[in-house]
Amino acid sequence: MAAVIAVIGAVPVAPALAQDLRPESLTLHGGTYSPRCAEASAPRVEIAASGLVVSQGPRRLHTPVRMDSYTSFGSAPTSPIPEGYVVEFIGDDFSLYVFQDGRGMYVPLDGYVPQAEAVVGKAGMAARFGRCAQPRGR
Protein backbone atom coordinates (compact mmCIF):
# COMPACT_ATOMS: atom_id res chain seq x y z
CA MET A 1 0.00 0.00 0.00
CA ALA A 2 2.84 2.42 0.83
CA ALA A 3 4.38 1.80 -2.61
CA VAL A 4 1.14 2.76 -4.34
CA ILE A 5 0.93 6.00 -2.40
CA ALA A 6 4.54 6.85 -3.26
CA VAL A 7 3.91 6.26 -6.97
CA ILE A 8 0.76 8.38 -6.97
CA GLY A 9 2.58 11.14 -5.10
CA ALA A 10 5.33 11.16 -7.74
CA VAL A 11 2.98 11.88 -10.65
CA PRO A 12 3.66 15.41 -11.96
CA VAL A 13 0.80 17.83 -11.43
CA ALA A 14 1.75 20.70 -13.78
CA PRO A 15 0.66 19.06 -17.07
CA ALA A 16 -2.84 18.53 -15.68
CA LEU A 17 -3.30 22.26 -15.16
CA ALA A 18 -3.23 23.01 -18.89
CA GLN A 19 -5.05 19.82 -19.80
CA ASP A 20 -8.13 21.69 -20.99
CA LEU A 21 -6.18 23.82 -23.49
CA ARG A 22 -6.72 22.11 -26.82
CA PRO A 23 -3.83 22.43 -29.31
CA GLU A 24 -6.34 22.81 -32.16
CA SER A 25 -7.81 25.89 -30.43
CA LEU A 26 -4.38 27.51 -30.44
CA THR A 27 -3.82 26.52 -34.07
CA LEU A 28 -7.19 27.88 -35.20
CA HIS A 29 -7.48 30.97 -33.00
CA GLY A 30 -4.12 31.67 -31.36
CA GLY A 31 -1.41 33.99 -32.57
CA THR A 32 -0.92 37.74 -32.65
CA TYR A 33 -3.72 40.30 -32.76
CA SER A 34 -3.20 44.04 -33.21
CA PRO A 35 -4.95 47.16 -34.51
CA ARG A 36 -1.91 47.74 -36.77
CA CYS A 37 -0.11 44.45 -37.40
CA ALA A 38 2.64 45.93 -39.59
CA GLU A 39 3.59 48.57 -37.03
CA ALA A 40 6.10 47.36 -34.41
CA SER A 41 5.06 50.01 -31.87
CA ALA A 42 1.35 49.10 -32.05
CA PRO A 43 -0.31 47.35 -29.11
CA ARG A 44 -0.47 43.57 -29.36
CA VAL A 45 -2.39 40.65 -27.94
CA GLU A 46 -0.67 37.25 -28.03
CA ILE A 47 -2.48 33.96 -27.53
CA ALA A 48 -0.04 31.05 -27.21
CA ALA A 49 0.58 27.91 -25.17
CA SER A 50 3.12 29.94 -23.19
CA GLY A 51 0.42 32.35 -22.03
CA LEU A 52 -1.84 35.28 -22.78
CA VAL A 53 -0.10 38.64 -23.28
CA VAL A 54 -1.28 42.21 -23.81
CA SER A 55 1.66 44.49 -24.62
CA GLN A 56 2.69 47.84 -26.00
CA GLY A 57 6.32 48.89 -25.96
CA PRO A 58 7.82 48.02 -22.57
CA ARG A 59 4.41 47.66 -20.88
CA ARG A 60 3.17 44.10 -20.59
CA LEU A 61 0.36 42.14 -18.96
CA HIS A 62 0.87 38.35 -18.87
CA THR A 63 -0.93 35.35 -17.43
CA PRO A 64 -0.49 31.61 -17.90
CA VAL A 65 -3.26 30.17 -20.08
CA ARG A 66 -5.10 27.24 -18.48
CA MET A 67 -7.93 26.28 -20.80
CA ASP A 68 -10.20 27.27 -23.66
CA SER A 69 -13.98 27.37 -23.70
CA TYR A 70 -16.41 27.48 -26.58
CA THR A 71 -19.39 27.80 -24.22
CA SER A 72 -18.29 30.57 -21.84
CA PHE A 73 -21.59 32.37 -22.18
CA GLY A 74 -23.65 29.21 -21.60
CA SER A 75 -24.82 26.46 -23.88
CA ALA A 76 -28.55 26.74 -23.27
CA PRO A 77 -30.66 28.03 -26.19
CA THR A 78 -31.62 31.04 -24.04
CA SER A 79 -28.03 31.98 -23.13
CA PRO A 80 -27.14 35.51 -24.29
CA ILE A 81 -24.11 34.73 -26.47
CA PRO A 82 -22.54 37.86 -27.99
CA GLU A 83 -22.67 37.95 -31.77
CA GLY A 84 -19.54 36.55 -33.37
CA TYR A 85 -18.23 34.84 -30.22
CA VAL A 86 -15.84 31.99 -31.07
CA VAL A 87 -13.73 30.98 -28.05
CA GLU A 88 -12.43 32.17 -24.69
CA PHE A 89 -8.84 31.51 -23.62
CA ILE A 90 -8.88 31.41 -19.83
CA GLY A 91 -5.82 32.48 -17.87
CA ASP A 92 -5.05 32.73 -14.17
CA ASP A 93 -5.45 36.52 -14.03
CA PHE A 94 -7.54 37.37 -17.09
CA SER A 95 -9.16 35.81 -20.13
CA LEU A 96 -9.10 36.75 -23.80
CA TYR A 97 -12.15 36.32 -26.02
CA VAL A 98 -11.91 35.71 -29.75
CA PHE A 99 -14.75 36.91 -31.97
CA GLN A 100 -15.24 36.75 -35.72
CA ASP A 101 -17.05 39.03 -38.14
CA GLY A 102 -16.90 39.77 -41.87
CA ARG A 103 -13.41 41.27 -41.46
CA GLY A 104 -12.00 38.21 -39.68
CA MET A 105 -11.07 37.24 -36.15
CA TYR A 106 -10.46 39.86 -33.46
CA VAL A 107 -9.95 40.19 -29.71
CA PRO A 108 -11.83 43.00 -27.91
CA LEU A 109 -10.29 44.40 -24.73
CA ASP A 110 -12.91 46.96 -23.67
CA GLY A 111 -15.44 45.27 -21.42
CA TYR A 112 -13.38 42.07 -21.22
CA VAL A 113 -9.88 42.88 -19.88
CA PRO A 114 -10.14 46.11 -17.82
CA GLN A 115 -6.60 45.75 -16.43
CA ALA A 116 -5.23 46.06 -19.99
CA GLU A 117 -5.94 49.82 -19.97
CA ALA A 118 -2.74 50.38 -17.96
CA VAL A 119 -0.85 48.78 -20.87
CA VAL A 120 -2.62 50.04 -24.02
CA GLY A 121 -4.39 53.19 -22.78
CA LYS A 122 -7.99 54.27 -23.42
CA ALA A 123 -7.59 54.38 -27.20
CA GLY A 124 -6.09 50.90 -27.22
CA MET A 125 -8.98 49.53 -25.19
CA ALA A 126 -11.45 50.67 -27.85
CA ALA A 127 -9.30 49.50 -30.79
CA ARG A 128 -10.12 46.46 -32.91
CA PHE A 129 -7.32 43.91 -32.37
CA GLY A 130 -7.54 41.97 -35.62
CA ARG A 131 -5.64 38.75 -36.19
CA CYS A 132 -2.28 39.34 -37.85
CA ALA A 133 -1.02 37.12 -40.66
CA GLN A 134 0.20 33.81 -39.29
CA PRO A 135 3.55 32.29 -40.26
CA ARG A 136 3.35 29.50 -42.85
CA GLY A 137 2.90 26.06 -41.41
CA ARG A 138 0.71 27.25 -38.60
Image: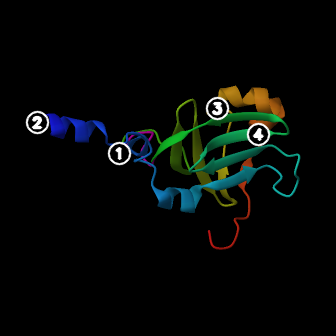
User: Which of the marked residues, 2 or 1, is nearer the chain's N terminus?
Assistant: 2
User: Which of the marked residues, 4 or 3, is nearer the chain's N terminus?
Assistant: 4
Q: Nearer the viewer, residue 22 or 106?
A: 22
Is residue 70 one of those drawn in magenta?
yes
User: Which of the marked residues, 2 or 3, is nearer the chain's N terminus?
Assistant: 2
Image-based side of 6 in relation to 53, left or right: left
Mark number displayed over residue 113: 3
Measuring 55% from the left and 62% from the top, which residue is drawn there?
Answer: 28
The CA span between labels 4 and 1 is: 36 Å
**How busy is the neighbourhood of tag 2: few (under 14 within 10 Å), some, or many (20 plus)?**
few
- The residue under label 1 is which amino acid type? Pro
Mark number displayed over residue 55: 4
**How busy is the neighbourhood of tag 3: few (under 14 within 10 Å), some, or many (20 plus)?**
some
Local SS, label 3: loop
Depth-wise, is mark 4 or mark 1 nearer the camera? 4
The CA span between labels 4 and 3 is: 13 Å
Q: Magenta span: helix, strand or loop, mainly?
A: loop
Q: Which residue is mark 1?
A: 77
**How busy is the neighbourhood of tag 1: few (under 14 within 10 Å), some, or many (20 plus)?**
few
Q: Quadrant of the C terminus?
A: bottom right
Measuring 55% from the left and 48% from the top, which residue is drawn there?
Answer: 83
The CA span between labels 2 and 4 is: 51 Å
Image-based side of 86 in relation to 31, left or right: left
Mark number displayed over residue 1: 2
Depth-wise, is mark 2 or mark 3 nearer the camera? 2
- The residue under label 4 is which amino acid type? Ser
Local SS, label 4: strand
Image-based side of 105 in relation to 83, left or right: right
Q: Quadrant of residue 95?
A: top right
User: Which of the marked residues, 3 or 1, is nearer the chain's N terminus?
Assistant: 1
Magenta extent: 69-75
